[in-house]
Amino acid sequence: MTELTDFSKLCIHTQTTKPWSIEECIAHFSKSGVRGISIWRHLLEGKDLKKIKTLLEINKMEPVSLVRGGFFPSLESHQRELALQDNRLAIDQAAALGAPVVVLVCGADPGQDLEVSRRQIIDGINQLIPYAKNMGVKLAIEPLHPMYAGDKSAVVSLEQANDMCESIASPMVGVAIDVYHLWWDNNLKNEIFRCGKNKNILAFHVCDWRVPTIDFLTDRGLMGEGCIPIKQIRKWVEEAGFEGYNEVEVFSDRLWAQDQKLYLEDIKKSYINHT
């Protein structure tokens, strides 16, 4: 792995600097020398996507992914259909902004078995593939930590995500590897290399697991603040053939409360030293 000496592969999720609007994220990221941005969809509500795309272009920002689609499972068929409609909208938004990937938080319904939810996820993704292919947008299955299995995702390991990708067998579908969700898995290295054989790593997300963690959703740390072997996992991902951005995705009430411009500089320092 080449030693990191610049920010050419640094991407920041807009949710990492949650207090900022999409316009502020674009302006401040660009001014600080960050060129990659992953955009969370709620920031696009009520916005003219053509204007946002123009802002990205003026500021020489590259949209890396759109977050998030998914949430396929439900006991109710009409809810599953609404999820498909929303995912098509996400694909439309990604295409309009020039983002090549929609990240899927696949969902779960606590009223049914996980295996039922997983079948519904596969079915939902299969239904979206023709539309995604037509729009030129890929779909990245993001496995979440098992603590989210009840309602956020029935996909809780990279092995399960790989199984799904191999079952679906479409070049439009791959995985998003997030160290926060997967660092604990003693089979992670093998599954990352399995991704490499399938050439299906579409995204790589980094942050850290603080010890102790006081909130499992909004107490993530910057890289180097916790116990995740981020450099080792990045090495495996790159050995598996991934050449894309390292996306900083941090949810933190503690960090959101700080001056976001100073926090942005801390993100860059953390990235250089611990990624």
Image (tube, rainbow, N blue to C red):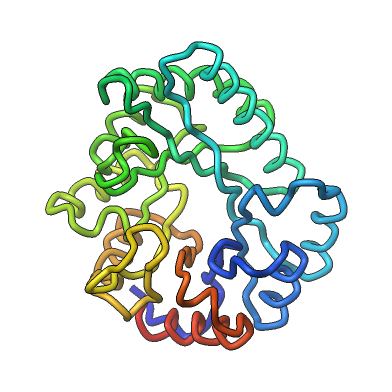
Horizontal side of residue 243 vs 45, given as left or right: left
Q: Horizontal and vertical percent for residue 165?
A: 36, 31
Horizontal side of residue 127 vs 230, given as left or right: right
Q: What is the count of numbered marks?
A: 0
Image quadrant in which the C terminus is located: bottom left
Q: Residue at x 67, y 61 (%)?
A: 62
Of 58 and 209, the residue lying toward us: 209
Image quadrant in which the N terminus is located: bottom left
Of 234 and 148, the residue lying toward us: 148
Residue at the left extreme, as displayed? 186
Q: Residue at x 47, y 85 (%)?
A: 5
Query: Does residue 246 show up?
Result: no
Looking at the picture, does residue 212 appear above or below residue 238? below
Q: Horizontal and vertical percent for residue 112?
A: 30, 19
Q: Quadrant of residue 52?
A: bottom right
Horizontal side of residue 146 vs 74, given as left or right: left
Looking at the picture, does residue 155 appear above or below residue 113? below
Query: Does residue 2 show up?
Result: yes
Q: Residue at x 17, y 52 (%)?
A: 185
Of 201 and 180, the residue lying toward us: 180
Of 86 and 274, the residue lying toward us: 86
Horizontal side of residue 133 vs 193, given as left or right: right
Q: Horizontal and vertical percent for residue 269?
A: 47, 87
Q: Residue at x 60, y 48 (%)?
A: 66
Looking at the picture, does residue 240 appear above or below residue 141? below
Residue at the top extreme, as displayed? 77
Q: Horizontal and vertical percent for residue 97?
A: 74, 48
Q: Quadrant of residue 122?
A: top left
